Structure formats: structure tokens, C-alpha cells
Amino acid sequence: MKKKLISLLLFIILAFPPVNYVFAATNQNAATNQNQVTLTLQQAVDMGLENDQGVKSADLEIDRTKELRDSAAKNIEFFPSLGSGYDYSTQYQVSWNNLLSADLTWQMSKKQDEVTRDALALQIAKSYWDVQSAETNLNTQQLIEKQALTYLQNAQVGYQTGVVSHSDVVNAETQWNQAKAAVDAAQKNLDSAYSAFNKLIGISQNERPILSDNPQYEPLVVNDLESEVERIANESPIVWLKQQQVTLQKWAADMAAFTGQYEPYQARKIAENQAELNADNTLELTKQGIRNLYYAIIEVEKSYDAAQEELRKAQEDLNVAKAKYSAGVAMQSDVISAEVAVAQAQQKIENLVRQHAYLKLAFEKPWAVSSSSSTSSSSN
């Protein structure tokens, strides 16, 4: 029996290449990528903004609403001045309503252009990182497949030498088939991630650019949460829009025929109060959303610290496995298992870093999050 085990160990050692082979596939991929285009995140965002139809339409909308606003302003200039300097005629009030509404629409179009650009930039950043995450996952699944193949080969040799049962071989085959299926799924996920990314930046679906920018982990520093929430909320174009509608209703409250028909004073005041309530509600919802993003970031930072400890332990276990393998008291399958644990721990950290980077961008411009889905439907 001892001779059988020694023979089995020698067979395994000779049958498999050194541990460094694990990284050979990555090096080969790097060699084939030499002719590929390399894109930074900023380059990708610039390409997306340049090619997106939604952005182009938003730019044109600014010009269109500016023309309407100027036309409404000219209509006001044609009204003759009365002796008192005021004209309370219905037509004059309607013209003022048209001017204020047109001016607000013009200002809104500029804000909407800002929202469209912010939403697309955030969406491109997420898609950029989704591709990187899919690539990392594919590499991890390939390593797991190698691990499963090693177990299968060990089981087959062990069965031939009589040290393992046939059911062990069957189980090893099942695990290997599952690992191969996981690799195929990871490859399809990568292709899907590239497809979404390529569409956003306006390049061919067949291209596979190298995405060179990896986000750097930097904890979010907020000295006073409520002050920061107030600042960001006040910069929100959505909050601004609701506040402008209040202004418009205040104007209407002072003109009985603002809409072309007489409206009782109390009805106009109620409309003003409704606009104020809507603005206040939008502001509070925006603030709460910003707080939620902040707390989500803090949770990711806690998870990141824990994941770092997991990676440290996995790396220590790998060093021990390599030392034992060099000393001849462990098999290569032990080393590969430790490498898989390191790869999975590293993948977890990278995903947390990308999630953290996305949430920080969303925290600074929360309006881009709610608008990204509509931007996606209009892009390209």
C-alpha cells in the first residue's frame, strides 16, 4: 500500500506543471490583447457622451426652448405702456405666463441636459466596472475548473491504484462538468457585459477594448452628514425644478387671469401651497435618498475591511501550501485549492471596491441614479 501511495504521489507531481502555470492563461491573454485598444474610464465616458443620441437631443432641446423663450419675450415688448405703467389685461397676463413658462422650460432643458449627461456618465462607469468584474469572475472560474480537473485526475489515478472508490471518480467528474459549465456561463456574462458597454460608448459589438482603469479604494470622508446632505440636495436639478414651479405659482397668484381665464384668489393660493408642498416633499425625499447612499457606502467599507482580513488569511494558507508542496509533503491539488481561495478573496475585494466607487459617484450626484434607466433607453 505504501508503494502505491508513493507511486500515486509521483504520478501527480509529474503529471501537472508547476504552480506558476495558473497564471499562464492570463499571460497568454495579455499577449493576444496587444493589438486591442486600451480605454481609460474618462475616455469611455467622453466617447459615450459624444455618441449618445439622448445627449444630442438634450443639447438641441436647449436651443429649441431658447428660441421659444425669446419669442415669448418679444410678445411682451409689443404691449404699450399704460399711464400707471401696468397692464392688467387678460392678454397681457397670458403673455407674461407664456414668458415665465417658456423661460422656466428653457432653464429646465439646461438642467435636463445636465441630468442626462450625469446619468450617462454614471451608467458608463458602472458598465466599465461590470466588464472588469466579469473578467475577474471568468479568471476565477477557470481556476476552479483547473482545480476540479486536478481532483478528477487524482481520483482516476487513485481508482486505478485502488485507493479511492468508483463513486469518488463519478463525484469528481460531476464537479468538473459543473466547473466547465460555470466557465461557459462566465464567458457569456463577459460577452454580455462587453455588449452593453460597447453600445453605451458607440463601438462595434465585436470589439473587446482593454479597460485599464481600476478604481482605487478611498473611504468616504464626511465631517457633517446633514450639512453634506443639504449641500447635495440643493444642487439637485429635480429639487430645483420643483422650487421653480413654486416661483411660477407665486407669479400666478398675483394675476387673476394668468392662464387666460379668471381664477379665484383662494384657488390660486391653494395651487401655490400645493407647489410648495411638492417642493418640500421632493427635497425631503432627496435628502433621505442621499442619507441611504451614505449608509450603504459605510456598509461596503465595513465589508471591505473584513474582506481584507479574509484575503490575508488566504494568502498565508497559500504560502503554507506552497512550502509543503516544495517539501514534498503536500500535493499540487492542495496548492491549487489555496490559489482558488486567494482568487475568490481577491475577487470579493475588487467587487467591493467597484461597488464603493459607484456608490460614491451616486452620493455626489444622486439624481443621476434615478435617471440612468431612462438614459439607457434613449442611448444610441
Image: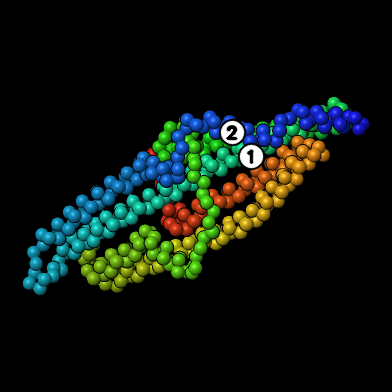
* Label 1 crowd bin: few (<14), some (14–19), many (20+), radius 10 Å: many
Q: How many marks?
A: 2
> Is residue 223 positioned above or below 179 on the image?
below
> Which SS class for mark 2?
helix
> Is residue 73 positioned above or below 145 on the image?
below
The colour scheme used to paint the residues is rainbow
Amino acid of disc 1 = Thr
N-term mark: 2 or 1: 2
The residue lying toward the viewer, choosing from 45 and 87, is 45
The location of residue 5, given as percent across then percent down, is 87, 32
> Which SS class for mark 1?
helix
Identify which residue is drawn at 45% across, 65% down: 229
Judged left or right of residue 293, residue 69 is left
* Among the 4 quarters of the image, the one containing residue 320: top right
Amino acid of disc 2 = Asn
> Is residue 46 positioned above or below 106 on the image?
above
Label 2 to label 1: alpha-carbon separation: 15 Å
The location of residue 98, given as percent across then percent down, is 22, 59
The location of residue 357, given as percent across then percent down, is 51, 52
Q: Which residue is mark 2?
A: 27
Residue at far front of view:
327
* Label 2 crowd bin: few (<14), some (14–19), many (20+), radius 10 Å: few
The numbered dot on residue 140 is: 1
Identify which residue is drawn at 27% across, 59% down: 104
Identify which residue is drawn at 43% across, 38% down: 199
The location of residue 328, given as percent across then percent down, is 81, 37
The numbered dot on residue 341 is: none
Identify which residue is drawn at 30% across, 47% down: 59
Judged left or right of residue 88, residue 254 is right
